[in-house]
Every structure is written in structure tokens, then in C-alpha cells.
């Protein structure tokens, strides 16, 4: 199992990804424009990460972001 990290972006969408190790995550995070991603949780299990991304507020944020993309694309 890798090192799982849960993020929330500027639109409020919650997602997660797995890194080989905490060290690799820190390297990646320090090298990127992390002002666009807030860390929600680190070092969680797959089940915990999935649960954090499946809350009602997380699903509503993803839905709203999708509507925004559709509006921009078809307006």
C-alpha cells in the first residue's frame, strides 16, 4: 500500500491519490503550485480516502464543478 493523500481543490472538489511514500509525496507537493490544493488528510487507508471523497458536500462540489464546465462549454 502506498501513502494516500486526500485533497480539496479551489472548487471544493475532494479527490485522493496514492504516492509510493510520504517522502515522494513531500517532494511532489513542495515542487507544485500547492496553493490550488488543500490537504484534507494524509496517510489514510484506501477506504478512509474513498469515504472522505464520498461525503455529501464532496459529491455536491463535484456536481457543481461539472455543471460549471458544461455551462462554459455550451454557453
Image (cartoon, grey):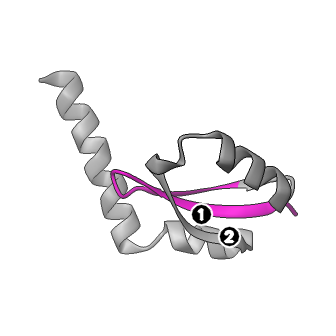
Q: Image check: 32 left or right of 22? A: left
CB atoms of marks 1 and 2 within 8 Å: yes
Q: Earlier in the sequence, mark 1 or mark 2?
A: 1
Magenta span contains residue 6: yes
Residue nearer the viewer, 6 or 65 = 6
* x and y, in percent, of residue 65 in the image: 30, 46
Which quadrant does the C terminus fall into? top left
Displayed quadrant of residue 69: top left
For image coordinates 31% across by 53% down, the residue present is: 63
Q: Secondary structure at mark 2?
A: strand
For image coordinates 33% across by 51% down, the residue present is: 11
Q: Which residues are magenta?
A: 1-17
Q: Name above or below for residue 12 compared with residue 29.
A: below
Magenta span contains residue 12: yes
* x and y, in percent, of residue 47 in the image: 68, 74
Question: Farthest front residue?
Answer: 30
Which quadrant does the N terminus fall into? bottom right
Residue 6's mark?
A: 1
Principal secondary structure, stretch drawn in magenta = strand
Residue nearer the viewer, 71 or 26 = 26
Mark 2 highlights which residue? 42
* x and y, in percent, of residue 66 in the image: 31, 43
For image coordinates 72% across by 45% down, the residue present is: 28
| Callout 1 crowding tier (Cα within 10 Å): few <14, some 14–19, many ≥20 | many
Amino acid at each position: 500500500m502506498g501513502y494516500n493523500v486526500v485533497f480539496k481543490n479551489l472548487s471544493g472538489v475532494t479527490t485522493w491519490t496514492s504516492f509510493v511514500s510520504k517522502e515522494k509525496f513531500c517532494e511532489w507537493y513542495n515542487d507544485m503550485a500547492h496553493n490550488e490544493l488543500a490537504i484534507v488528510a494524509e496517510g489514510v487507508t484506501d477506504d478512509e480516502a474513498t469515504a472522505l471523497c464520498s461525503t455529501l458536500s464532496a459529491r455536491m462540489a463535484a456536481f457543481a464543478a461539472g455543471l460549471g464546465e458544461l455551462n462554459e462549454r455550451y454557453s
